[in-house]
Image (tube, rainbow, N blue to C red):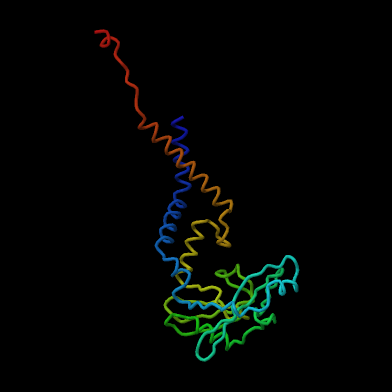
């Protein structure tokens, strides 16, 4: 039995050594990186709309859509009198389409111009770089692949290699991506072993390696117990009779 567990432990160790090291390394790196910095919260100015301005009810908006439509809240940003302002907006996701309505009038919110997007991106940017490029993306890169297209990508020339992704109709920053986030995402990929989408925590590869690592740990415990378990003392019968 001991020989079986020793052989099992050794072979599992050889197979798992690299991935176990990557689990510890990636966990350490993700623990070290401040999550606020990873999300780019220090680079983004957040402004909220005054929802007392909302006159139209969500039910009035949802009546225009199918029963499967989902509903959420957002803001339409504008630059007025050298100040960033926000008005309330309803977002309706109906099938594969995203609709935006003014909560004050109920009218559809039209897309902003590139000049508006550039101005709003700069207004929401708290960094020390300059705006380098603006692109309206119909196909999104991996770092925002789970968001609905289209989105404006705004690139800033700063030490963080920052990119803002803005809603084309509201001008609101949806995501901030920096080099810190990209490093975090890389190590997250190694940690969950999803090398394609980097989001599936229940993929078969992770489950298989995790189960093998548990078996590796269990076999090690068995070997450790068999090595250090208390030994029974054998009494010499001649000595015991004296």
* Residue appearing at x 45%, y 44% in the figure: 13
In the rendered image, residue 172, in percent from the top left (x then y), is placed at 56, 78
In the rendered image, residue 66, in percent from the top left (x then y), is placed at 75, 68
Of residues 153 and 92, the one drawn nearer to the viewer in this rendering: 92
Q: Is residue 83 left or right of residue 241?
A: right
Of residues 47 and 203, the one drawn nearer to the viewer in this rendering: 47
* Residue appearing at x 57%, y 69% in the figure: 142
Count the marks: how many?
A: 0
In the rendered image, residue 146, in percent from the top left (x then y), is placed at 60, 67
In the rendered image, residue 75, in percent from the top left (x then y), is placed at 59, 78
* Residue appearing at x 41%, y 35% in the figure: 223
Would you identify the image quadrant in which residue 217 lies?
top left
Q: Quadrant of the C terminus?
A: top left
* Figure check: 134 above or below 193: below
Of residues 71 and 185, the one drawn nearer to the viewer in this rendering: 71
Q: Residue furthest top?
A: 241
Would you identify the image quadrant in which residue 168 lies?
bottom right
* Figure check: 203 above or below 175: above
Q: Residue furthest left?
A: 242
* Figure check: 136 above or below 4: below
Q: Is residue 77 left or right of residue 227?
A: right
Of residues 206 and 32, the one drawn nearer to the viewer in this rendering: 32
């Amino acid at each position: 039995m001991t020989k079986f567990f020793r052989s099992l432990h050794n072979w599992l160790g050889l197979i798992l050594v690299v991935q176990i090291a990557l689990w510890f390394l990636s966990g350490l790196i993700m623990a070290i990186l401040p999550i606020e910095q990873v999300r780019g919260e220090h680079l983004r100015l957040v402004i909220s709309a005054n929802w007392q301005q909302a006159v139209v009810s969500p039910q009035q908006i949802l009546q225009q859509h199918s029963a499967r439509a989902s509903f959420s809240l957002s803001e339409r940003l504008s630059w007025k009198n050298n100040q960033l302002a926000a008005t309330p907006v309803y977002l309706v996701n109906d099938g594969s389409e995203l609709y935006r309505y003014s909560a004050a009038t109920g009218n559809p919110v039209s897309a902003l111009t590139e000049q508006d997007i550039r101005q709003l991106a700069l207004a929401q940017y708290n960094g020390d770089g300059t705006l380098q490029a603006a692109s309206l993306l119909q196909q999104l890169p991996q770092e925002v692949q789970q968001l609905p297209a289209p989105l404006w990508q705004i690139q800033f020339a700063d030490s963080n290699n920052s990119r803002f992704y803005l809603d084309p109709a509201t001008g609101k920053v949806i995501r901030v991506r920096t080099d810190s986030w990209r490093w975090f995402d890389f190590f997250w990929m190694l940690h969950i072993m999803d090398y394609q989408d980097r989001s599936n925590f229940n993929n078969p590869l992770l489950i298989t390696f995790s189960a093998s690592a548990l078996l590796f740990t269990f076999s090690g415990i068995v070997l450790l117990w068999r090595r250090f378990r208390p030994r029974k003392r054998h009494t010499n019968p001649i000595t015991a009779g004296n």
